[in-house]
Image (cartoon, coloured by chain):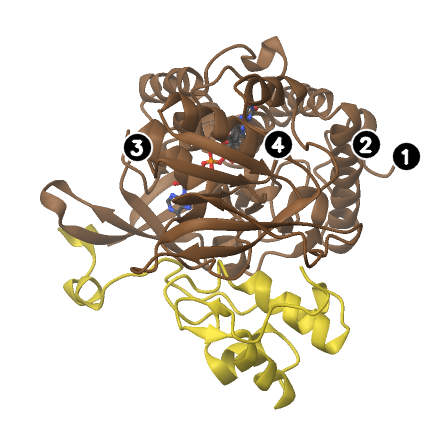
Amino acid sequence: MSSKGIPDDMLVCRCEEITADEIRQAIREGARDVTGVKRRVRAGMGLCQGRICEKFVQQILCQELHMGLVQTGRSTARPPVRPVPFGELARGCGNDL
Amino acid sequence: MILEKDVVVIGAGPAGLAASIEAAKAGAGVLLVDLNLKAGGQLFKQIHKFFGSRAHYSGTRGYDIGRKLVREAESLKVDVWLQSTAVGVFPGNKVGIERILDGGVKKLYTVHGKAVIIATGASENAVCFKGWTRPGVMGAGAAQTMVNVNHVRPGKKIVMLGSGNVGLIVSYQLMQAGCDVLALVEAAPKIGGYAVHAAKISRAGVPIITSHTIVEALGDEKGTVRGAVIAKVDSHFQPISGTERTIECDTIAIAAGLRPVVDLTRLMNCASVFEPVFGGFIPLHNTDMETSVKGIYVAGDSTGVEEASVAMEEGRIAGTAAAQSLGYLSAAEAGKTKKLLWERVNSLRSGPFGERRLTAEKNLLEHFREEIREPQPEIMIGGLAHGAD
Ligand SMILES: Cc1cc2nc3c(=O)[nH]c(=O)nc-3n(C[C@H](O)[C@H](O)[C@H](O)COP(=O)(O)OP(=O)(O)OC[C@H]3O[C@@H](n4cnc5c(N)ncnc54)[C@H](O)[C@@H]3O)c2cc1C
């Protein structure tokens, strides 16, 4: 990664279309870890649940706040870990068939 | 009504298959689920002959190893659900599974496993350069799946980033599939993978450009890739401005390493650590491959990115331990098997890379013992002995 870091206009979270600049803005507003960034700007809240961008968000946090990677934390995992359509949940459990 | 199984195994790569085989051999009822159409995990993409030792099928092609394991699992009456994704693991070892049935109907199931073995493998790392989200930029593993599994070329003119074994092998396989690999770009000053694989690429006339990185993916009027801008990097891997040049291509494949898929163990709050040697955050486990949550086991790349050979041995350990915990094997029987398997894992972790993994594994086991709980009394072995140096 460049020492200047990920350029501001770079798309970092492609699911929610969040740029590096928006992530830096979230940090200026007080985000101190991956979860803080996610709450403010939705990075990592899309279809892939941060599988791709979490590493980049961590990188930006490390650079902006001079912190270690482990301190940036990880966002809370929630079920379902892969996307499931609502209709399927409504249809109920296949066990009962 | 919740379905009941002795052992639920998530992921049918070499680790999950080996785990299922061991548990079923001991007499346990096993359900093995995988989201793909076929069992075998990464093995089905590997058309090359494997490296490693004879005991681990070196010289055999990955898909042949996969087929052999699948046949063995089937003959032991392992229940295999394909196109079935574990979407959650919940307290009390309940596994939520989304299964695609005949006719394409999707259904959700809950299966209670007295033991659950998570063997979900690894996913590819992305690299963030200008234009990285353009169509035509993809993981090397994705490109490999396209040519070797789906028989579709990802593009005609390819630039590969990363010269580890994955970058080297996939470049060669793309060439075998009829693609032009224009260059292999590597940020480090020297090639990362094995010399044999690099030689195949070089002999075919593909330049391996070290100390360089991709700084931009250029797009055509539709936005899809039409070129890669590469630049020389300094000793801190920073691109040096003024050294940029463009390689015209329609596909950029990225082989920048893999990291463990740990979403299910995170969901279960299994204690985890960050271990760069193993590719990132991984769940802690003991010599039974059991996590901090009793009854939840892990194996393979999802507990540290290594090789199929290690994944199989770890799977066998987890399968044996799970069968033991359910009373299908005595402590003495299981202990003997696990000791042997650990010796095999240790022997695989040799050479400069292997030794780093051996040390890292030892630290992880130590950490587990200190922070989580004492090991099962019956084993420990050689370099990995609990408590000993
Ligand atoms: C190009 C390349 C070349 C390689 N060459 C060699 C070699 O020569 N020798 C060697 O020993 N190793 C080699 N390897 C490494 C080897 O392929 C892996 O280490 C091995 O496949 C890991 O096995 P695994 O079972 O842990 O994971 P995988 O093989 O990745 O299997 C995991 C499975 O879990 C499934 N899964 C994941 N999440 C879920 C879920 N939620 N629900 C249901 N299913 C899920 C996936 O679909 C997948 O099928 C190579 C790898 C690559 C990429």
Quadrant holding the N terminus of chain A: bottom right
Disc 3 + disc 1, Cβ < 8 Å: no
Q: Which mark identifies residue B80?
A: 3
| Tag 1 residue | B389
The chain carrying label 1 is B
Q: Does the residue tagged 2 have its C-beta within 8 Å of any atom of ligand 1?
A: no
Question: Label 3 sits on what residue type?
Answer: Val
Residue B208 is labelled as 4
Disc 2 is attached to a residue of which chain? B
Tell me which numbered mark, 3 or 2, is placed earlier along the sequence.
3
Looking at the rendered structure, the number of numbered marks drawn on it comes to 4
Circles 3 and 4: CB atoms closer than 8 Å: no
Q: Residue B380 location in percent, x, y?
A: 76, 29
- Disc 1 C-beta below 8 A from ligand 1: no
On the question of residue B9 being in view, the answer is no
| Crowd class of label 4 (few under 14; some 14 to 19; many from 20; radius 10 Å) | many
Disc 3 chain ID: B
Q: Position of residue B180 (x, y in %)?
A: 42, 30
Query: Residue B199, percent across and down?
Result: 61, 18
Report how far apart the C-alphas of labels 1 and 2 lie in the structure: 7 Å
Residue B385 image label: 2
Q: Which chain is brown?
A: B
Which residue is rendered at x = 31% and y = 39% of the image?
A: B36
Disc 4 marks which amino acid? Ile
Q: Are marks 3 and 2 on the same chain?
A: yes
> For the residues tagged 4 and 1, is the chain the same?
yes
Q: Are marks 1 and 2 in contact (CB under 8 Å)?
A: yes
Q: Amino acid at mark 2?
A: Ala
Q: Nearer the viewer, mark 3 or mark 4?
A: 4
- Please give left or right for residue B365 compared with residue A14 in the image: right
Q: CA distance from mark 4 to mark 2?
A: 42 Å
Distance Cα–Cα, label 4 vs label 1: 42 Å
